[in-house]
Amino acid sequence: MEQAGLASVALVTLLMGMQCLYFSFKVGQARGKYNVQAPATTGHEMFERAYRIHLNTLEMLFVALPAMWVCAIYLDAGFAALLGLVFIVGRFVYASGYLQAPERRARGTIIGFLATIALVLGGLWGVIAAMLAS
């Protein structure tokens, strides 16, 4: 992988981490605003939405982040970084929709999920191609 490609994937990795930290901060804000004391994970509906946004993002990162790196190494770094950015946009769309109403989270969920599936399939394709070539 060339240095520029590596840098683009590293940048997107850091942006994913920053987004997760931002969502974590929003959970803390919601705890204070809606008086939900730790370690409680239920209480006010708006707190629960902020909490789910953060946890669902963590759940998706568990797959998206390693898939992005595998896709970058074995297929194409620019493609992987672009899909990583799409994932980030999808998570913001998900969060914005979910905070408005739970039924409005679907668009963002689909965007992030499709980006993640593309990263997994791209990485899988690249790894299999590399194994067959050796």
Image (cartoon, grey):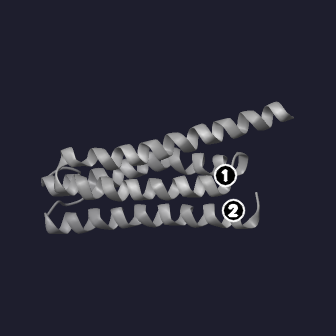
Crowding at mark 1 (Cα within 10 Å: few <14, some 14-19, many 20+): many
Circle number at residue 107: none
Above or below, 60 against 88 in this view is above
Q: Is residue 104 left or right of residue 66?
A: left
Q: Earlier in the sequence, mark 2 or mark 1?
A: 2
Q: Label 2 to label 1, Cα distance in Å?
A: 8 Å
State the residue position of label 1. 72
Above or below, 100 against 127 in this view is below
Residue 89 in the image, given as x and y percentages of width and height: 41, 58
Secondary structure beneath dot 1 equals helix
Q: Residue 59: in sight, yes or no? A: no
Question: CB under 8 Å between callouts 2 and 1?
Answer: yes
- Amino acid type of the residue that numbered disc 2 sits on in the rendered structure: Gly
Secondary structure beneath dot 2 equals helix
State the residue position of label 2. 5
- Amino acid type of the residue that numbered disc 1 sits on in the rendered structure: Ala
Residue 9 in the image, given as x and y percentages of width and height: 62, 60
Q: In this view, does 37 lie to the left or right of 86?
A: left
Crowding at mark 2 (Cα within 10 Å: few <14, some 14-19, many 20+): some
In which quadrant will I find the N terminus? Answer: bottom right
Identified at 46% across, 55% down, the residue is 86
Identified at 69% across, 62% down, the residue is 5
Identified at 75% across, 35% down, the residue is 129
Q: Residue 118: in sight, yes or no? A: yes
Identified at 41% across, 61% down, the residue is 20
In which quadrant will I find the C terminus? Answer: top right
Q: Is residue 1 left or right of residue 32?
A: right
Residue 72 in the image, given as x and y percentages of width and height: 66, 52
Quarter of the view holding residue 99:
bottom left
Q: Is residue 133 left or right of residue 61?
A: right
Quarter of the view holding residue 38:
bottom left
